[in-house]
Image (cartoon, grey):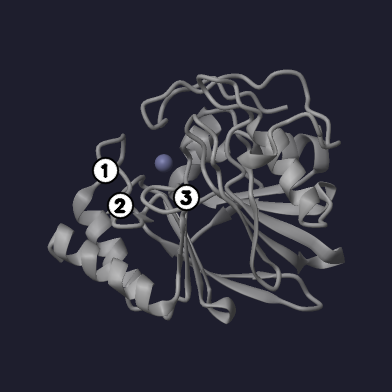
Amino acid sequence: MIKFTATTASDGQRSHQPDSPLSLTANNQQNDSLTPIMQLAENLYAHLWQGQDNNCNTYLISNCLDQGKHLVIDPGHMKTQGSDEPALEMLLKGIQGDGLDPAAIGMIVLTHCHPDHIEAAGFFQSRLKTRIAIHRAEAELYEQMGGIADLILDEGDLILGYENPVTLNIFHSPGHSPGHITIYWAAAKTLIAGDLIFYRSTGRTDLPGGSLPQMKESIKRLSELNIEWLLCGHAYGNPGVIEGKEEVQDNFHFLAQQLMF
Ligand SMILES: [Zn+2]
């Protein structure tokens, strides 16, 4: 099991070591309200974090890998820091609630290497042989934090599956962190934005490797895409899902004015 003990790039919070291995069986005693299930489109699911402590939103594209396996973007914390909310347990339960088998998660793509996005990745990798993908410019930090990447991403197309291939466009979108990526699924007009773009705000640029000029450039490029669903890494100002082309464009215009680009 991967252990996360480093604190290098957290959002100002300390990463912690995972506890004993978690069961894949859902625990019905847990609070159901923590992970509302949201199916956005065919094969696209959002698990929007609503706990008290910080944790990221997780997104899932189902049946996009061979043998009907699924892709997860940013699995989040094992347990939250502060109240020890069972973040991973809730995610697993949410996935089961979608009618999907967590054991069929074949790949995890990490938007960037902050503990609130990556911590649970090692659980899937060690227990389920899930492959982990991260951008080249984030891979060294991921290793320093105890992670092992199976696939190094560069900007370009990531083509998943053979039978019904799904093409994701990986954009290198630095600003919040040096190797931050955003993931554009053109066929679903969906952008998974990690911690780059939120509703009426952006990710922090004051963390190690952050850069405001890079963030402006990253956001500007993405504003030209045809987006119906903009899926944010956190629920700041709204649940984390910006829906509809008009809303998405409004949000880009707002950010352009705020950031002056
Ligand atoms: Zn972050």
**Which three-letter amino acid code belongs to the residue tagged 3?**
Gly
Q: Residues within 10 Å of mark 3 (few under 14, many from 20)?
A: many
- Label 2 CB sits under 8 Å from any ligand 1 atom: no
Q: Residue shown at 29%/42% (left/top)?
A: 204
> Marks 3 and 2, Cα distance to the nearest angstrom?
10 Å
**SS assignment at label 1:** loop
Q: Which mark is residue 233?
A: 3
Q: Residue 97, percent across and down?
A: 78, 51
In the rendered structure, which disc, 3 or 2, sits on the residue that comes first in sequence? 2
Residue of label 2: 202
3D distance between C-alphas at marks 2 and 1: 9 Å
- The mark closer to the camera, 1 or 3, is 3
Labels 2 & 1 near each other (Cβ < 8 A) = yes
Residue type highlighted by circle 1: Thr
- Secondary structure of residue under mark 3: loop
Judging by the rendered image, the residue that carries numbered circle 1 is 205
Q: Is residue 157 left or right of residue 195?
A: right
Mark 1 neighbour class, 10 Å CA radius: few under 14, some 14 to 19, many 20 or more: some
Q: Position of residue 84 (x, y in %)?
A: 59, 21
